[in-house]
Image: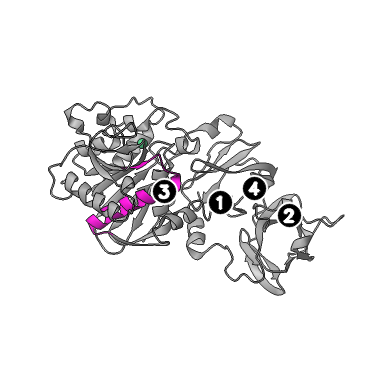
Amino acid sequence: MSKQYVFTLFACFFSISCFSEPLQFSLHKIESKNSGPTLLVIGGIQGDEPGGFTAASMLVTSYKVTKGNVWVVPNLNFESIIRRSRGVHGDMNRKFSSLSENDPEFQQVQKIKKIILDQQVDIILNLHDGSGFYKKEYINKMHNPERWGQSIIIDQKKIDIAEYGELKKIADKVQQHINSHLKNKKKYFYVKNTNTKNGNVQMEKTLTYFAIKNNRPAFAVEASKSFLTDERTYYHLLAVEGFMKEMGITYNRGFNLTMNDVSRKIGHNLKISMYNNRINLNVEKARRSLNYIPLKRDASLQYKKNNPLIAVVGNQESLKIRYGNRHVTSLKPQYFDYDYELNSIKIQVDGIEKDINIGEEINVKNNFRVLAGSDYRVNIIGYAKHGTVNENGLLIKKKQIKPRFSIDRDEKIFRVELYKGKKFSGMILVNFIEPQQSQPISMNKTNSQKLSVSNL
Ligand SMILES: [Zn+2]
């Protein structure tokens, strides 16, 4: 299995305008050793449909494929997702039949078309959140043939290819799979055929019809906007698993596919690291803003993230961390030259001396003591004792740190920063766990691997 992470890099600096350049989507290949078909799942073609892109991102963060492959583009219209807009440059899902080279999304559309046409891809899914509830017959304003929610969309009954060409039959099977998991009939899925080639001018411009015209099986899945994001995400995952079942793709997922577990997973475990792990932030429950973050002077912003829906946007004075449509936190930076010599330091954690890598998050029950070399100055953000400028060697208890300086709203996670002269050498996070608690929130192996993927 390999997961490909593409990290964002702002290649320009000292220019506010470069921060408004479009963010790029990422392709994540979740592949298995056992050969089998490849499903391509696309989320976020419209930036205000979080059910689709959240489900797609969860495939990346929480699924392992054991037979066949799943390719995921969870953030196709990433800029619009981050700015919570259907499309900051118009509706991207109307740009697939013809598009001016001057369109700001021209390159992105070309890139996704190439992935759609990749010989390895067998089926393409485009995940949407749609209005109301699709029904074959008119029932009322929200339940009728013009609505989109709770449906699997096909452009036509079939295409003439050897495998997966029977679009209607496949969609029917997936519909059955989804509905078999739903207790409430009001939430059932149905198959909607847009009959695109018979003069459906709007649908001719879409991503799925581009695929169909090129003889590639493609479907759209629509979860109803009448539901909250968590519930829409749950339906999308049921649909994606229905397609995987039809294709014989097998997988493990890191949670139970129930509404509650999906809810718990969304927004869980959000981390970013900056400048080769010199700064590491656990932003799952971050405060609305974090002050005096020591960013690198005269350098472009460099960061890695463990979730494809995270982005850092803004300018030199103020940066915002976003997760999909959500604001996570603002960073008020302070700029420093960096010292890259320090890779690890000794810290006494509850009386036991350990080697801790720069950028790590450590769990502390009662107290800790940083034992850095005498060249280094240690600044524990929020440590209250009057008159100290260097906390190197001091025994530190939680009650000695002002809670309002924590990174998180739970007031448990604090920054320990190291400086050599005027240079910033790196940060370590201290997570005060309850003494009786045995399973603290910490970075598990999978995530630290994700964070250590090639540095741009
Ligand atoms: Zn849509």
**Residue that badge 2 annotates:** 403
Q: How many angstroms separate mark 4 from mark 3 (CA)?
A: 26 Å
Residue on which disc 3 sits = 231
Q: CA distance from mark 1 to mark 3?
A: 27 Å
Q: Are marks 2 and 4 in contact (CB under 8 Å)?
A: no
Q: Which residues are magenta?
A: 220-249
Q: Nearer the viewer, mark 2 or mark 1?
A: 2
Q: In the image, 350: left or right of 109?
A: right
Residue under pointer 1? 272
Q: Nearer the viewer, residue 62 or 341?
A: 62
SS of the residue under disc 4: loop
Q: Is residue 204 above or below residue 173?
A: above
Q: Is residue 117 visible?
A: no
Q: Amino acid at mark 3?
A: Glu
C-alpha distance separating marks 2 and 4: 12 Å
Residue at point 19% right, 26% down? 199
Which callout, 4 or 1, points at the residue further toward the start of the chain?
1
